Image: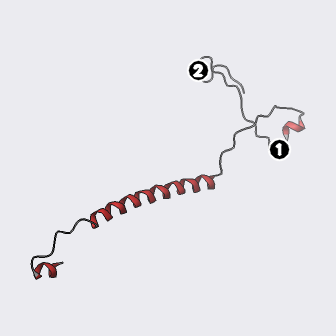
């Protein structure tokens, strides 16, 4: 049912949804104007896109972490070892 001021002063309820599973509207010769609703993406597609976005972010973070790790590994050497004990310790 339509209702004035339902959502606040001057904000009337302007539409409602009718689910006619048993064709009662046809039986009683009632004609209700239909409006086109917006369809959202299927749940499977939304989940796939969310997972794809998550994998992309994880891949980016991993690539940045690998660059940082490579930078640490490629640090300049400290020079030749002073004694054989230093070589054995490594």
Name the one closer to the observer, 1 or 74.
Answer: 74
Residue found at x 80% / y 44%: 21
Query: Please, is residue 37 above or below residue 10 in the view?
Result: below
Q: Position of residue 30 (x, y in %)?
A: 87, 32
- For the residues carrying marks 2 and 1, which lies nearer the camera in this image? 2
Question: Sequence order check: which comes first, mark 2 or mark 1?
Answer: 2
Residue found at x 15% / y 82%: 88
Residue placed under numbered mark 1 in the picture: 22
Judged from the image, the secondary structure of the residue bearing numbered disc 1 is: loop
The quadrant of the rendering that contains the N terminus is top right
Q: Position of residue 24 (x, y in %)?
A: 85, 39
Query: Please, is residue 60 above or below residue 31 in the view?
Result: below
Looking at the picture, the colour scheme in use is: secondary structure
Residue found at x 49% / y 59%: 55
Q: Position of residue 39 (x, y in %)?
A: 69, 43
Q: Position of residue 4 (x, y in %)?
A: 67, 19
Residue placed under numbered mark 2 in the picture: 8
Hey, which quadrant is residue 74 in on the image?
A: bottom left
């Amino acid at each position: 049912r339509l209702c004035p001021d339902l959502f606040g002063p001057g904000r009337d309820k302007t539409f409602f949804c009718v689910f006619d599973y048993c064709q009662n509207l046809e039986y009683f010769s009632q004609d209700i104007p239909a409006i086109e609703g917006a369809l959202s993406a299927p749940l499977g597609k939304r989940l796939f896109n969310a997972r794809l976005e998550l994998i992309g972010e994880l891949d980016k973070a991993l690539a940045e972490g690998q660059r940082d790790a490579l930078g640490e590994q490629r640090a300049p050497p400290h020079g030749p070892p002073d004694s054989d004990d230093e070589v054995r310790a490594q």
